[in-house]
Amino acid sequence: MALQQVSLKLLEGADLNPGRIPSSDGAWIGSIPPGVVFPFVGPTPPADYLECNGAAVSRTTYNLLFSALTTTFTGNNTANSAIVSGIGSTSHMAPGMFVEGPGVPVGTTISTVDSATQITLSAAIPTANTGATFTLFSFGQGDGSTTFNLPDLRGEFIRGYDNGRGIDTGRAFGSWQADSFAAHSHGIGTTTVSGAGGSYFSTNSIPGGVVGVGVQSSTTGGSETRPRNVALMFCIKYQ
């Protein structure tokens, strides 16, 4: 009976309350927060969602999503220096991430993560700051003023953020990762070849020598390594 009530409430509220979660007694108990990503089976995003296609969208119109996709941190810098110190933690930062803040030129990114409390930017900050608030962008800063970028998940698989577990080390939150094969080898055994008149040749018969061997394997496979899959549209909640 409870399952029937939940299903009925989902149908009743599908258009009037998109993203909200009903309880078995008919009351709304919560909502899906901005920034949640899920695969959608239709070719266009549902109400209150955008396709994760990397587009630059308005910081004003999608202000809740802007807050969800960016993080802020405080830091200090001297005039005409690219070094920002006194940061609480740099564990979620990585080279290439865009940074905005007082006096920071548009398009500035993190060049290096120097320590647990310091980073070096790609451009110097002309003015000195103490305890200033900076904004960090994991997916792009748009035009650096009025827009920001959505995650671009088209054609991509999602992997859980390692966050200190040690399985996928060295990854920053939101960072892209190319395909890879685990390290492996293909061995070639030694052999002895007999010739005329009782002669022979062995790949082990020249101590300290070098024998050139040409080996060619057949080519198989496509342009990428992938598991079986079904293509759906990744969408992100914006309010």
Image (tube, rainbow, N blue to C red):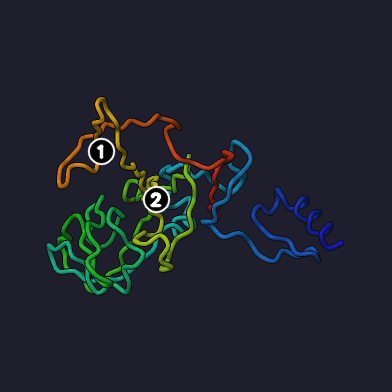
Residue 54 lies in what quarter of the image?
top left
Residue topped by disc 1: 202
Judged by depth in the image, the label closer to the viewer, 2 or 1, is 1
Most distant residue in the left direction? 80
What residue sits 30% from the left and 54% below the top? 98
Residue topped by disc 2: 182
What residue sits 48% from the left and 54% below the top? 159
Callout 1: helix, strand or loop? Answer: strand
Q: Quick check: 127 left or right of 232?
A: left
Callout 2: helix, strand or loop? Answer: loop
Residue 44 lies in what quarter of the image?
top right
* Image quadrant where one finds the N terminus: bottom right
Q: Residues within 10 Å of mark 2 (few under 14, many from 20)?
A: few
Amino acid tagged 2? Ala
* Position of residue 103 measured from the top left corner of the image (x, y, whole percent): 21, 60
* Position of residue 128 measured from the top left corner of the image (x, y, whole percent): 17, 68
Most distant residue in the front direction? 197
Of pointers 2 and 1, the one earlier in the residue sequence: 2
What residue sits 40% from the left and 29% below the top? 218
* Position of residue 39 measured from the top left corner of the image (x, y, whole percent): 58, 46
* Image quadrant where one finds the C terminus: bottom right
Amino acid tagged 1? Ser
Marks 2/1: CA–CA distance: 33 Å
Q: Quick check: 135 left or right of 37?
A: left
